[in-house]
Image (cartoon, rainbow, N blue to C red):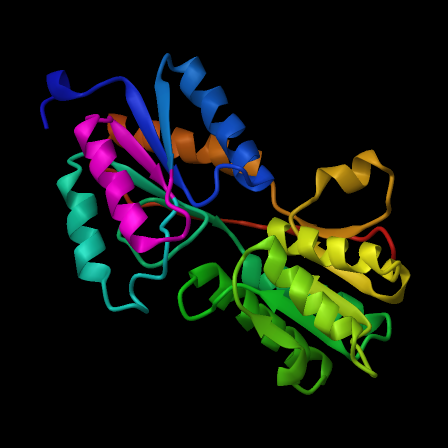
Amino acid sequence: RRSSDLSSTVGVIVPEIGNAFFGDLFKGIEEVLNRNDLSLLYCGNEDNAEKDFQALDMMKTQRVMGVLYVPAVNYPAMGTMGRIQKKLDSLGCPVVCIDRDIGFHRDTIHFNDREAINTAVRSLAETGHRKIALINGNSDKNILALERYGGYLEGLRDTGIPEDGEIIFQGEYEQPYAYSVMKELMGREDPPTAVITCNNSLGKGYLQAVYEENRAGEFTHIGLDRIEMLDLLRIPNNYILRDSFEMGRRAAEMLISRIAFPDRRIQNVLLEASLVRGTF
């Protein structure tokens, strides 16, 4: 595409605009774009392939100069990699993939979620926990859910804890799902002693369930991503810290660099996530 056809707008496509993780991501992106006198056009794909394609079509219509993109689903696992690759190529502008690496030959930046969940399991095991539940998204459709599940299984193997399918839950990354799972777990005669939730929404569902029954003290919980309200209320909590502001800032810089130097080598940046322990 000729430079005269380009707008001074960068497109951003994320799953959930309301999720605090993506809110901080936007702030990081905006800081860089503002500094470069560029505007931002964002769209949610709701982890839905068809909405993903619609969002990409909108970016093409708006003639954005580049796209910062979180893929909605695990396209290779669903056998539709060719279709999404074609769609991305048709944009005619650079694309940086954020948060999820599903194998596109494009600049990518994401967190090492597998290692982070592995560390969470090992930390719990080192403090005596042998029954550690996992509440996760769908690992068949979502690459992050697959990575997180892989890290959980590696953590169990590393600590000699046998896998127990009765305490592994892989459904939706939504608050009501974790709420219903925890209600069911709390109704068991022998519930787990620790619970790992694999995103902010699941963490909120867990909290809703345990506080409703006044049983928060019975479980050690590690959430993926910080829930700011807990810190504001000074409630000690454990979480995997992923600095999405920093990821957004670096992703925007990668995109601007790619626009300036279209032939440079593809970059794949892996960011580390740290475990913050407040209760154990």
Does residue 4 appear to the left or right of 26 in the view shown?
Answer: left
Q: Position of residue 16 (x, y in %)?
A: 48, 43
Question: Can residue 42 be seen in the rendering of this structure?
Answer: yes
Along the line of sight, the residue nearer the viewer: 126 or 26: 26
In the image, farthest residue toward the top:
37
Query: In this image, 244 relative to 63: left or right?
Result: right
Q: In the rendered structure, which segment of residues is drawn in magenta?
A: 44-69
The single residue placed furthest to the left in the displayed view is: 2
Vertical position of residue 117 compared to residue 200: above or below:
below
Residue at 20% across, 53% down:
85
Asked whether 176 or 200 is in front, the reply is: 176
- Left or right: residue 220 versus residue 108 is right
In the image, what residue occupies the spot 75% across and 54% down?
207
Q: Where in the figure is residue 37, as x and y percent of width and height?
A: 37, 12
Q: Using the image, determine if residue 277 lies above or below residue 252.
A: below
**Residue beneath the point at 47% across and 49% down:** 110
Quadrant of the frame with the C terminus: bottom right
Of 161 and 231, the residue lying toward us = 231
**In screen coordinates, is 219 left or right of 35?**
right
Q: Quadrant of the N terminus?
A: top left
- Residue at (82, 73) in percent of width and height: 193
Q: Is residue 151 above or below residue 275?
A: below
Where does the image place residue 246, in percent across and percent down from the top left? 55, 34
- Asked if residue 54 is among those painted magenta in the image, a careful observer would answer yes
Q: Is residue 118 visible?
A: no
